[in-house]
Amino acid sequence: MLGASGVHMGKYIMQACAGCLGNEMGRCNVCNTGICPKGITSQNPKLYRRLDPDDVAQRVADVFSSIRIEMKKIMAPLGRSQSLPIGMADALGIDDADAAQRLGIKYIC
């Protein structure tokens, strides 16, 4: 659903959190061969022991937490809502009374 943006984000996460050596200029290009030097895409025990999954998981959580904080800093002066995935909460409406009450948005008959 995200298309190129999703791929770009995944590549950023691999590089920032898992230590992937690939980049735009000098790509490693061994992901599909199973000999990733960082152990990310490897099935070889000698290689994948280099990767600490708990450490990577914590880094991924930190990255998404940082993105959320930065988005709040950008959106707060614009008056945008952080509790709803779509822009201005006062402009939203739905024709389901229960959902409108749970989300705290307008019910439209």
Image: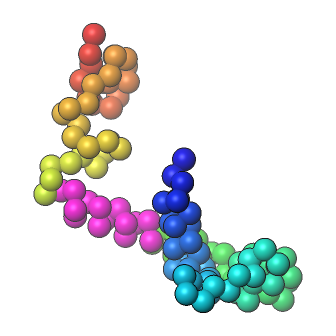
Q: Residue at x 51, y 52 (%)?
A: 2
| Highlighted magenta segment, given as a residue range | 63-76
Q: Relative to 1, does residue 67 appear above or below in the rendering?
A: below
Residue 105 sits inside the magenta stretch: no
- Occupied quadrant, residue 83: top left
Between 15 and 96, the residue placed more toward the observer is: 15
Q: Position of residue 103 (x, y in %)?
A: 33, 32
Q: Position of residue 71 (x, y in %)?
A: 29, 61
Q: Residue at x 56, y 72 (%)?
A: 11
- Occupied quadrant, residue 10: bottom right
Q: Position of residue 41 (x, y in %)?
A: 75, 75
Between 31 and 67, the residue placed more toward the observer is: 31
The reply to whether residue 19 is in sight is no
Q: Residue at x 84, y 89 (%)?
A: 46
Q: Relative to 20, does residue 11 appear above or below in the rendering?
A: above
The reply to whether residue 24 is in sight is yes
Question: How is this picture coloured?
Answer: rainbow
Residue found at the far right of this picture: 44
Q: Residue at x 66, y 75 (%)?
A: 53
Residue found at the far top of this picture: 109
Q: Relative to 28, does residue 106 appear above or below in the rendering?
A: above
The prevailing secondary structure element of the residues shown in magenta is helix
